[in-house]
Every structure is written in C-alpha cells, then in structure tokens.
Amino acid sequence: MKHDIAKALLSIQAVFLRPDEPFTWASGIKSPIYCDNRLTLTSPQVRTLIEQSLAKTIKTYFPTCEVVMGTSTAGIAHAAIVGHLMNIPMGYVRGSAKDHGRTNQIEGRLLPKQKVVVIEDLISTAGSSIETVNVLREHDADVLGIASIFTYNMKKSKDKLKENNVVNISLCDLDTLLDVAIETRYIKSDDKTKILKFRDNPQDESWMKGEK
C-alpha cells in the first residue's frame, strides 16, 4: 500500500521534491520537500485510493473505532469521506474554540468514552496532531490513535507521539516515497541522502551543500 500511495502522491504533485531549489517554511527553515495533500481531493482516482486505504487502516489497526475526527482544516474532508465509507459518525476539532454561539472547539456529536480515531493529512513534527488528541481527551474521548496520509518520520514527531501515548498509522512515509521517486527517476540516489539528512535535522542546512 505504501508504494501505491507514494506513486499516487507523486503523480498529482501532492508532494514536491526539490533538493536543488529548497522551499522556505514559515519558520524560515529551508526544506527539500513540500507536501500538499489537499490536492488528493481534486483527483477522483487518487482520492478514492486514499480514502479507501484510510478506512482499511482504521478497520485493521483500530477495529473498535466508533467515530472519526478530522484535524482542522486539512483533515476535515478526509474524515467526512472516511466516515461515509465506514458508515460511522464524523466530526472535526477546531484549532481553537469559537468566540460566538456555543463556543465549540469540537464540531459534531461526541459522547463520553466514545472511541475515536483522528484523521490527519500530514505528520511533520506532530505538534498540531497532539493538540487535537489532547482536546478530544479533555472532552472524555477514548482516542485510539491517528490515521494519517503521510509522515516525514521525523524523530521529533516520533518522540512527541510516544510521550503522549499516541499511536499513528500512516498510509505512506518519506522513506518509501524517496525509493519510489528514485525508481521513477524523479530524483537521483544522491538526492535521497540529502533529503534524509534534512529529515533527521531540519535546522542543519549542511545537506544543501552535500555534506555528510
């Protein structure tokens, strides 16, 4: 499955690999990779693959799931489709509570002790994902884990997930995607080394010079 998802993400340019012309993140960090999984929603074939794979992942790893909750905003549409495929309720968690009306932060009905799986499009440092899980836990939800489309497999994210006792299952990861990118001649083998060096320490820009 990871191989198929990687090919699909690259085919619609939901993931860009540009080690020779790095992207600049909002933090100022130079990155050889840019991921926009919102584009999966605009490709019916890829969208079907993604949503069916998320549903299968939940049934396999979180079989007692009763409701899916999307992260705001990128996870909302995916959670809606997955909830429909699985015939279970869905909702989503706002980045912060509304300042009007019922001042909800969780949208959709969530019952105490209900077993929840969070739907996330991308795991980078896992910060926003953990925040979503904590909001759900504060509202007495039993969070089984996260089902995500893609993860960079950064050490920081793995440490955060472990510290917060959160299981994440991703459809695809950076290592698999780089192997597929080499197979399809999107990048060279040397580029894989650069990108993995970036992944292991985003603050260290020596990867751009090809330093080992």
Image (cartoon, rainbow, N blue to C red):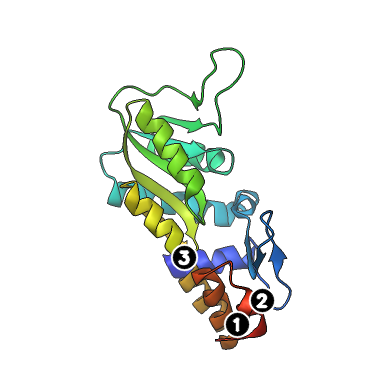
Q: Which amino acid does label 2 sit on?
A: Pro
Residue 155 % position (x, y): 43, 64
Residue denoted by label 2: 19
Q: At 49% from the left edge and 58% from the top edge, which residue is drawn?
A: 150
Q: Which residue is drawn at 71% across and 65% down?
A: 23
Residue at disc 1, secondary structure: helix
The amino acid pointed to by label 1 is: Asp
Please state, as top left, top right, bottom left or bottom right, where the C terminus lies in the image. bottom right
Kindly indicate the quadrant of the structure image that contains residue 36. Answer: bottom right
Residue 38 in view (yes/no) = yes
Against 115, residue 183 (above or below) is: below
SS of the residue under disc 2: loop
Separation of marks 2 and 1 at Cα, in angstroms: 6 Å
Q: In which quarter of the image is the N terminus?
A: bottom left
Name of the residue lying farthest toward the top: 101
Q: Name the residue under label 3.
A: 173
The crowding category of the residue bearing disc 2, from other C-alpha atoms within 10 Å (few below 14, some 14 to 19, many at least 20), is many
Decide which of tag 2 and tag 3 comes sooner along the chain: 2
Give whichever of 149, 95 is nearer the camera.
95
Element class at badge 3 = strand
Q: Do the residues labelled 2 and 1 touch (CB within 8 Å)?
A: yes
Picture quadrant of residue 76: top right
Query: Which numbered mark, 2 or 3, is in the foreground of this view?
Result: 2
Which x, y percent locates residue 132? 46, 38
Compared to 180, does 71 lie above or below? above
Residue drawn where x is 49% and y is 54% of the image: 50
Q: Which of marks 3 and 1 is nearer the N terminus?
A: 3
Whole-percent x, y for residue 210 in the image: 62, 85
Residue in the foreground of this view, choosing between 138 and 72: 138
Residue denoted by label 1: 191
| Front-lying residue, 80 or 130 | 130
